[in-house]
Image (cartoon, rainbow, N blue to C red):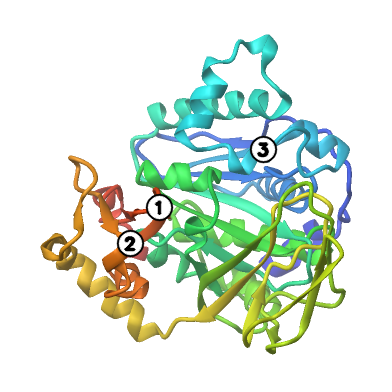
Amino acid sequence: MFSHLIKQTLRKKKAIEFMEVDRILFENKSSPEYPTVVFYAGVHGNEPAGVQALQRLKEYVQLNKVKLKGNVIAITGNKAALSTSKRFHVEDLNRMWTKDKINKTLETPSEKRNQEQKEQFELLELLDEILVEAKGPLYFFDLHTTSSETIPFTTVNDSLINRKFAEKIPVPMILGIEEYLDGPLLSYINQLGYVSFGFEGGQHLSETSIENHFSFCLLSLQIADILDADADRKYSYIKVLTENAQHSKEIYEIYYRHAIDPSDHFFMETGYTNFQKIKKGQLLAEVNGELLYADHDARIFMPLYQSQGEDAFFAVRKIPKWILSFSAFLRKQRIDRLLILLPGVRWASLSKNTLMVNKSIARFFAKEVMHLMGYRSRYFDKEFLLMKNREADSKKELYAKADWMR
């Protein structure tokens, strides 16, 4: 019965390119003591699939009188860009969530804000309201798609609570993207301590992307204990994601980003798909008239096939599950506290959640070791690395009684 209802709802609309939508797509209010799940979609205006999936979620809940034991709010990101099918108008809304850029938006008079600053201001107001009202566990999910062909996957800031929840989603998990991108929305929310990660549903205008997003939303509501999960329901949306992910639940880590400038003339070689293996010497792209070849064997991630964007492609590698288990052990035992005994390492903040590491000695303990202990590096200057601890901000106590934490 449930499987039929999902398929019936999914057939109602096809992927569309231009959208005029409200800021709040769907809202279900319950007791503030119950869990709250927040979905964002359309943070990039050329990615309408997540918005359409949330519209279908609203239809499904209303048409089938589904009881939700908790609070659900579905939020549109960049309304103006969605209406023109552009990634953004002035600046990338998903690169504006650094302290400096948020302050700039808040300090700029309303009549002088650019389009993305206007969007950000409204999103900040909404987020503040949510944080004030919610008393139970909070979850934030950002729905995206890619310009290249891909199976669905999650992008996860590397904290144990994020990992634990994302492990329940039957798609590949990608760790470490926060090291390479400045200012994503969910990196900002991660710093507030909540479970928050991205879900990439597929290619931008693919009908399958909508199906994947819709299934992810239902599954995440079930994991958060907002949607009851009888056997038929659980099987249906897990089945969709499992099959569309080609039964892959691999865990990968990003280790390389090839950045481009907005002024660059960049052309990715046609035919690359996400997670595709590439060989040393293989032609990848043309940049400002020069051919770019792979300098080592790798697995390419999110190759760029759109006009806007500063990430030409990434490279990822698989992480064995035993390493993640060992990592969880080290973090729970707070072994990282011993790192300051090393020469050239000191705390960068009074809260002891960030290390400042002298680059001249950083080569003596591999970056991978720091990752095991929950630290992700950001460049500070020519001499030092700043390494942020992802566990220090996590509100673990908020989720201690959740079934998915067991």
Dot 1 or dot 2: first in sequence order is 2
> Residue 385 at x, y = what percent?
35, 55
Residue 349, picture quadrant: top left
Residue 323, picture quadrant: bottom left
Q: Taking 214 as reference, is 373 left or right?
A: left
Residue 238, picture quadrant: bottom right
Dot 2 or dot 3: first in sequence order is 3
Whether label 1 touches label 3, CB < 8 Å: no
**Label 2 sits on residue:** 359
Local SS, label 2: helix
**Does 367 sit above or below residue 199?**
below
Please name which of the two marks, 2 or 3, marks the residue nearer to the observer.
Answer: 2
Q: Taking 16 as reference, is 129 left or right?
A: left
**Does 369 sit above or below residue 205?**
below
Dot 1 or dot 3: first in sequence order is 3
Q: Residues within 10 Å of mark 1 (few under 14, many from 20)?
A: few
Distance between the alpha carbons at the discs numbered 1 and 2: 8 Å
**Label 1 sits on residue:** 382
> Residue 155 at x, y = what percent?
54, 62
Q: Residue at x 33, y 62 (%)?
A: 359
* Residue 77, numbered label: 3
> Does residue 344 appear in this view?
yes
> Residue 54 at x, y = what percent?
69, 47
